[in-house]
Image (cartoon, rainbow, N blue to C red):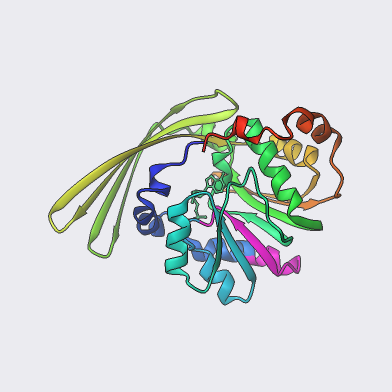
Amino acid sequence: MKIMRIYTDYARVYHEMYQSIFNYENEFQLYDKSLSKLKCKKILEIGCGSGNLAKYFIKKGYDYTGLDISKEMIELSKELVPEGKFIRADMRNLELNEKFDAVIVTGRTFTHLTTNHDVMFALRSIHKILRKDSWLLFDNFNAHEIFTNFKDHMTHKSKYSNRKYTRKSYTSFDFEHGWTWKWKAIYEIKEEGEKRSFEDEIILRAFTEDELKLFLHISGFEVSKMQKESNAIFTIAQKKSEERTNAQLHYFKKKENNFSEISQV
Ligand SMILES: C[S@@+](CC[C@H](N)C(=O)[O-])C[C@H]1O[C@@H](n2cnc3c(N)ncnc32)[C@H](O)[C@@H]1O
């Protein structure tokens, strides 16, 4: 799995730019509303990035842990939210010694699971670290929206402190493994008369509701809610049993010890 430069070498640029891309307070409210109703206290956020949601969860009294694949994002989270617990790991291969009331996968992080193998491994990992009857909440891009209203270029401008950011995005259909597209972004940073730029490229994946339901079902979850929000789907699913499903028994029989075969980190 390729990790984008914006999550590694340029993690701080991500942090500053994305303050105007995501509304973190609204995102927190969305998760908090459901987590409170479900009485979840001990939570794991996968794809915690630079810890933007961590500070809200901690302030509200959750027993919170943030997890991200990027070393730079974890370092930044620890710097910006020193009271938080943060772990570096790949969501497709989690080996944690604790169990959670809920796992949340936030900010479209699911979009990086571009192959069916990635999805199967990630859901198995998440299933393992949840208690029985506990919850998985996540958002992802809605394939119907993305591909019906496909935009091949976009420009985003933002300002943070004395820095001006411009991101030009160019997208094209990929369709190699599912509802995937190629995203190339050119970032420009202007600061005190100086200009620098860098490029980033990645494949991203959207899902249909049916695809999500099937992946979740064969991974031992039952969907309790699916809610469409602009170009995304917000899903709540419950872990149904400790046992492996029939599909998992077949799927993981050969792949059991072969995570490295699918991992390109
Ligand atoms: C779009 S960002 C969202 C970050 C944060 N939730 C936010 O809203 O700002 C996606 C995050 O997922 C992380 N990520 C991507 N693939 C991952 C994987 N396989 N396991 C864990 N984290 C991953 C990236 O490093 C990045 O920080």
Q: Picture coordinates of residue 145 (x, y %)? A: 55, 37
Q: Picture coordinates of residue 191 (x, y %)? A: 19, 56
Q: Residue at x 48, y 55 (%)?
A: 49
**247 sits left or right of 119 in the view:** right
Q: Residue at x 59, y 66 (%)?
A: 29
Q: Is residue 190 visible?
A: yes
**22 sits left or right of 63 in the view:** left
The total number of labels drawn is 0
Write the start and end of the magenta stretch as one range. Answer: 32-48
Residue 76, quarter of the rendered image: bottom left
Q: Residue at x 67, y 64 (%)?
A: 43
**62 sits left or right of 8 in the view:** right
Decide whether residue 29 is among the magenta residues. Answer: no
Front-lying residue, 97 or 184 = 97
Q: Is residue 22 visible?
A: no
Decide whether residue 37 is among the magenta residues. Answer: yes
Q: Residue at x 51, y 70 (%)?
A: 55
Q: Picture coordinates of residue 210 (x, y %)? A: 72, 35
